[in-house]
Image: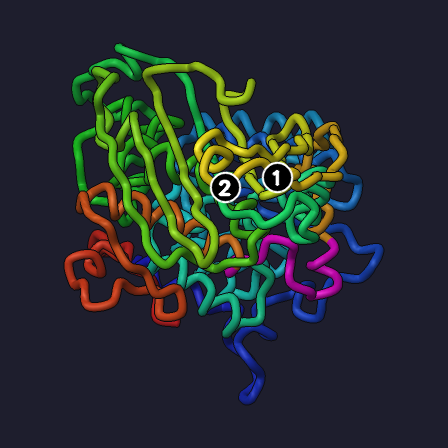
Amino acid sequence: MAWDSISRRSFVGTAGVGVAALSAGRASGGLGANEKVRFGLIGAGSRGNQLLDTFLARNDVECVAVADVDDRHAAQTADRIKAKKGNTPTTARDYRAMLDSKDIDCVLIATPDHWHALPTIQAVMAGKDVYVEKPVAHNVAEGRAMITAARKYNKIVAVGTQQRSSSHFQEAVADVKSGKIGKVFWIQTWNFENISPTGMGQYADGPVPSGVDYDRWLGPAPSRAFNSNRFHLLFRWFFDYAGGMMSDWGVHLNDIALWAVDQKGPKTVYATGGIVTSNDNRDTPDTLQVVYEFPGTTLTYSMRKGNGLKFNGRDYGILFCGTDGSILLDRSGYEIIPDTTTLPYGIKEVHGDRPLRKIDLQPKKVLGVDGNPAHAENFIQCLRSREKPICDVEIAHDSTNTCHLGNIAYKLGRKLTWDAATESFPNDPEANALLSRKARAGYELPKI
């Protein structure tokens, strides 16, 4: 069965009625205030079950279907749902059956990155709303296709960059936007840890585990022999399926940076790094420095796997540097750190003494708030109101693109110029060729 030819039973109806209206079932006009949301989970691994915990903590939702290419994942997750909620969801390796069900309002997608675009697009074409994990897609072209589908079929597509729903992130961004710390001209984001020299280790290819549909797991990615280092959880360290730490964690951090300075993308990007401290199977870098130029602001993303020295006491985070002070931010909270002006020796010797500018900024510390419950709440409310979610697919696409751009610059080893409006590198066919890839036969995106 071709992947772009999902069952059209629900698409057959009276002439003149739109496809989305026919297939959306209960969700076609928005859920009523007291209707329980019934959803299907696509991808029942580690992150899928974390999402499940957040959504099943609510009384107004019910998971009625689980799809995973690993039978063990699907069965264990179904057991957890039954123990927590009392119902036994259907399970399958293939998610497409749930897209035909008029009893399912939406799907949660927590698959590896290379499996985000296809089920999202097929879901909205079948009339379902979607919550999909970050990063939005494997590449820029897939992300843009997801936006096109969401808009054409008028569906909610929310993305799991849940920091946008954390009150302390919202407050910190408001402080930046208000000018509280002065002109923000430098932003630093980072991830530091030491896993050298072993990393994941070197593992040989081997047999596919029983109960796993490995061909379906590969999906649009190139065909390769099974290797445990390229499979569950560890897939993210291979460009076939993801974008390394840049896409896995950098997307969360750069998302907040773009939000605070109200930008869709940089003017230029340059990256340097490599695999320099880890002796394992990965092909994504374990050391990376990316510099993005925005109008009036520079953003740098730093990542290293061979040294865990914390930066300002944090192994990850966001630092906004303004002319009056700084904001240091992560999930544990944020603080405003006032700055002081100085008169360097050289200036004083040439021009004489002069009064220093007084900075009246007051220090401030705010404890962090978990954004996951509020992010789930926002998605559920948008299913009812039909408003765009706090992290709509287009917002998250822009943030994800910073990661794609960083990786493309790393691969090419040179500074790139980016046009965010056209989502292209002007007059640079070599770079533009890396904005997409040809999917493996049978797993192409459907025509939208």
Q: Is residue 252 visible?
A: no
Q: Residues in magenta? A: 381-394
Q: Is residue 262 left or right of residue 142?
A: right
Query: Closer to the camera, 11 or 229?
Result: 229
Residue located 60% across and 32% down the image: 328
Q: State the image quarter where residue 160 is shown.
A: top right
Q: Position of residue 329 (x, y in %)?
A: 61, 33
Q: Residue furthest right?
A: 34
Q: Is residue 382 magenta?
A: yes
Q: Is residue 63 left or right of residue 16?
A: right
Q: Amino acid at mark 2?
A: His
Residue located 19% across and 68% down the image: 427
Residue located 50% across and 26% down the image: 316
Is 144 situated above or below 410? below
Mark 1 near mark 2, Cβ–Cβ under 8 Å?
A: yes
Q: Is residue 172 magenta?
A: no
- Residue, disc 1: 354
Q: Is residue 277 left or right of residue 33?
A: left
Q: State the image quarter where residue 431 is shown.
A: bottom left
- Residue, disc 2: 351
For numbered disc 1, what is the local secondary structure? loop
Q: Quadrant of the N terminus?
A: bottom left
Q: Quadrant of the C terminus?
A: bottom left
Label 1 and label 2: CA atoms lie apart by 8 Å
